[in-house]
Image: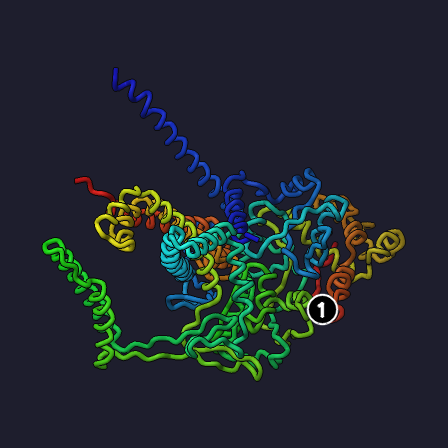
């Protein structure tokens, strides 16, 4: 009797909804296949292995038109990831700085931070993107009159031309960094133990910095590892037109997208940080002060670890937003997944349904991955009740 | 402004339309045409055009569309509905155009679209003819001193539209010349022009007619030249959905009528008098004084006369939109076969 009632009230409605959903999806799928069949369009993903035959401005992996559409998808995806990850890093750094600065006792600092946050937070992202691309980077000079920065970087309308690192035995250099990191980690553990036992504080920061800087540098000094630079050179395209060749060119499309995404998102992160810090009871601050901690120490050791629990969940949202907003790239010809795959590839193949589904699925996967990662981090820093 | 999201949404929306709408226009063979019936019922022709290309399809401040491509839409409207103005224009980006046509958002796509095998065969479209013979070229700044594509050197950056055949031809061209280049592809023609004009790229490449038309939009048109070389064949023409043979015939013969009218010296001002007075059986067939050409297409017999009277013949259309506007004064390949051009239509009989 009891079980019957449960079935009736709980399981049955859920079953209905589920069946309805499956039928609905099935209906759409069936309809699509019938319609496409009528119009002589075959559904399938075999196009992914066909030759793409279009070039892409900027790619992290080897690519030209002789590669497949699948490869073009990968190029677009990596470009999306590149701008998202760099954007997230810069947005986080700026966000924390301005979030803390807004709470500063120094009126000038806090007012400046407020102005920064309120300005960039309240202008639509697409306008900021156009501002950086059309108003700022488009007014840069032609390569002939490049703006030199320390005589190694050159800023022109075609982008930022930087030297390219050419490593010999990069593996050794890389291992040196890893070894330095491992030793620092072990030193941190040792220092923490030492502090717990004797209360003595070891100069953890300086030791770690020194290790990470000196160890890799030693490999360079001893000549095991060799680093050369390929400098960008001004070459002639015709008697009157020049351009930079060689080195690495950071295209203006990437720079504008990065500026826009990082500045816009950093303001929201700054507000999250402020909310997190203000959410911590005043008593905590007073208690740390009475223990003799400096303001910086109190922030770093007492306030922030607790505030992070408030900051992380909404910041995860901002990371997701930044990643999704990177699709605005198509507005300024940055070759991200939307421009390359859901744009050019879609046009050249005409496979709208396949390509749009793949692109949607890709963004979904990206977002879910970020969520999982941030949830894991959030759990890790959560208060453990003793 | 936010058109990249918008066009993504549009594509998504149109794809779902394709998913959702129950099969339209698949009957073939008989005079029954779903597209024709629907067009008559709603009393306007749904026509897809460009987002603004002078000479081909361009809207003025009041929203009136003019151009060679627009005239094809007008001809279809004149033939089917009796009034060339009964057209609803939908401006489409290169990216959106085929999805819009396949999903039924538009019934004729007349948007400087290149006829290629894969487009014709692979994605459910049918090209009905060619209304402009074009080829891809390059534009550079005069101050660069470049006068031929032979002077191009590695490192050159080239701006073009994304999702077009030009993007593919450009690669073929530079690859065959062994030149490394930086391709920058924008979604909208305006953005390409702006980028090139600002100096972001050294050359702008698209169909030569497009170059000539866009040149008129530059800050200072005299500072730019179109290089003489043509690197590809670009036959531009109207497109319809595959599977509605009657509609396909109507669009094809609306275009052919304009060309054939020019061949026989029939224009918007003399068409009706020729219908009364002409003794030439070919002329009489074109203006509907002889034969039952309209019935064969499921239309009345005055359909072709209306096209010529309301829209004009091909030569009139070319003169009005392309020659007199200074885009391409010389007709070149777009002249009648009798004058050494490529325009040669099957006879209307």
Locate residue A86 relative to residue B198 in the image: left or right: left
**Picture mark count:** 1
Residue at far right of view: B277
Q: Is residue A95 visible?
A: no
Judging depth in this view, the residue of A201 and A375 nearest the camera is A201
Which corner quadrant holds the C terminus of chain B? bottom right
Q: Is residue A3 visible?
A: yes
Judging depth in this view, the residue of B204 and B34 nearest the camera is B204
Residue at far top of view: A1
Identify the residue at horizontal 82%, vertical 54% (top origin).
B284
Identify the residue at horizontal 22%, vertical 73% (top origin).
A214
* Chain where mark 1 sits: B
Q: Which residue is mark 1?
A: B328
User: Pointer 1: residues within 10 angstroms few (<14), some, or many (20+)?
Assistant: some
Judging depth in this view, the residue of B176 and A146 nearest the camera is A146
Residue at far left of view: A197
Q: Where residue B316 appears, x then y in whole percent?
A: 78, 61
Q: Is residue B207 above or below residue A353?
A: below
Q: Where residue A65 appears, x then y in whole percent?
A: 45, 67
Question: Which color mode does the image show?
Answer: rainbow
Q: Where residue A356 appears, x then y in whole percent?
A: 46, 50
Locate residue A100 relative to residue B112 in the image: left or right: left
Secondary structure under the numbered disc 1 in the rendered image: loop
Locate residue B189 relative to residue B292 in the image: left or right: left
Q: Where residue B239 appears, x then y in whole percent?
A: 62, 54
Identify the residue at horizontal 17%, vertical 65% (top origin).
A183
Q: Is residue B181 above or below residue A253?
A: below
């Amino acid at each position: 009797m009891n079980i019957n009632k449960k079935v009736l009230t709980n399981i049955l409605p859920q079953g209905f909804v589920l069946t309805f959903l499956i039928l609905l999806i099935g209906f759409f799928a069936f309809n699509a296949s019938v319609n496409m069949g009528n119009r002589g369009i075959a559904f399938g993903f075999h196009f992914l292995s066909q030759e793409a035959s279009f070039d892409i401005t900027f790619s992290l992996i080897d690519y030209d038109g002789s590669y497949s559409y699948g490869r073009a998808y990968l190029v677009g995806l990596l470009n999306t990831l590149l701008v998202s990850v760099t954007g997230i890093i810069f947005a986080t750094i700026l966000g924390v700085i301005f979030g803390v600065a807004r709470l500063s006792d120094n009126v000038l600092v806090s007012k400046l931070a407020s102005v920064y946050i309120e300005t960039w937070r309240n202008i639509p992202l697409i306008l900021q993107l156009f501002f950086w691309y059309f108003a700022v980077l488009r007014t840069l000079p032609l390569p002939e009159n490049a703006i030199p920065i320390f005589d190694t970087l050159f800023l022109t309308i075609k982008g930022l031309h930087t030297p390219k690192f050419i490593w010999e035995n990069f593996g050794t250099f890389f291992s040196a960094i890893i070894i330095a990191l491992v030793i620092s980690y072990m030193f941190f553990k040792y220092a923490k133990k030492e502090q717990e036992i004797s209360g003595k504080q070891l100069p953890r920061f300086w030791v770690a910095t020194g290790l990470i800087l000196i160890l890799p540098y030693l490999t360079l000094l001893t000549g095991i590892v060799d680093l050369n630079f390929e400098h960008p050179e001004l070459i002639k395209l015709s008697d009157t037109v020049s351009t930079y060749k060689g080195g690495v060119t950071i295209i203006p499309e990437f720079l504008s997208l990065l500026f826009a995404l990082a500045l816009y998102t950093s303001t929201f992160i700054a507000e999250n940080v402020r909310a997190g810090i203000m959410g911590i009871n005043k008593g905590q601050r007073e208690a740390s002060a009475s223990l003799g901690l400096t303001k910086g120490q109190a922030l770093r050791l007492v306030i922030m670890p607790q505030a992070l629990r408030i900051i992380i969940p909404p910041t995860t949202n901002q990371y997701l937003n930044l990643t999704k907003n990177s699709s605005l790239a198509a507005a300024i010809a940055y070759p991200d997944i939307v421009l390359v795959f859901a744009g050019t590839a879609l046009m050249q193949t005409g496979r709208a349904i396949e390509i749009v589904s793949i692109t949607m699925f890709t963004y979904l996967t990206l977002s879910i991955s970020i969520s999982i990662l941030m949830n894991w981090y959030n759990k890790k820093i959560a208060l453990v009740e003793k | 402004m936010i058109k990249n999201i918008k066009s993504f949404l549009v594509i998504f929306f149109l794809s779902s339309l394709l998913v959702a709408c129950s099969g339209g226009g698949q009957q073939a063979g008989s005079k029954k045409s779903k597209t024709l019936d629907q067009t008559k019922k709603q009393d306007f022709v749904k026509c897809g055009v460009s987002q603004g290309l002078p000479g081909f399809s361009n809207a003025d401040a009041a929203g009136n569309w003019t151009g060679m491509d627009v005239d094809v839409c007008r001809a279809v409207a004149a033939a089917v509905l009796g009034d060339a103005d009964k057209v609803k224009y939908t401006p489409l980006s290169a990216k959106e155009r085929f999805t819009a046509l396949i999903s039924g958002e538009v019934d004729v796509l007349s948007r400087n679209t290149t006829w290629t095998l894969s487009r014709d065969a692979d994605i459910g479209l049918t090209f009905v003819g060619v209304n402009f013979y074009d080829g891809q070229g390059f534009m550079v700044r005069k101050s660069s001193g470049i006068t031929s594509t032979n002077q191009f050197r590695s490192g050159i950056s080239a701006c073009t539209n994304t999702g077009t055949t030009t993007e593919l031809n450009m690669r073929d061209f530079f690859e065959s010349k062994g030149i490394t280049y930086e391709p920058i592809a924008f979604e909208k023609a305006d953005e390409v022009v702006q980028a090139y004009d600002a100096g972001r790229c050294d050359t702008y490449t698209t169909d030569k007619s497009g170059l000539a038309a866009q040149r008129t939009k530059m800050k200072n048109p005299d500072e730019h030249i179109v290089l003489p070389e043509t690197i590809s064949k670009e036959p531009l023409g109207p497109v319809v959905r595959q599977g509605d043979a009657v509609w396909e015939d109507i669009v094809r013969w609306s275009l052919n009528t304009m060309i054939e009218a020019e061949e026989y010296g029939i224009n918007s001002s003399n068409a009706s008098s020729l219908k009364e007075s002409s003794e030439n059986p070919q002329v009489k067939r074109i203006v509907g004084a002889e034969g039952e050409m309209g019935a064969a297409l499921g239309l009345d017999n005055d359909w072709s006369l209306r096209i010529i009277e309301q829209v004009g013949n091909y030569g009139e259309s070319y003169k009005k939109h392309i020659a007199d506007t200074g885009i391409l004064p010389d007709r070149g390949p777009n002249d009648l076969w009798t004058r050494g051009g490529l325009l040669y239509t099957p006879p209307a009989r």
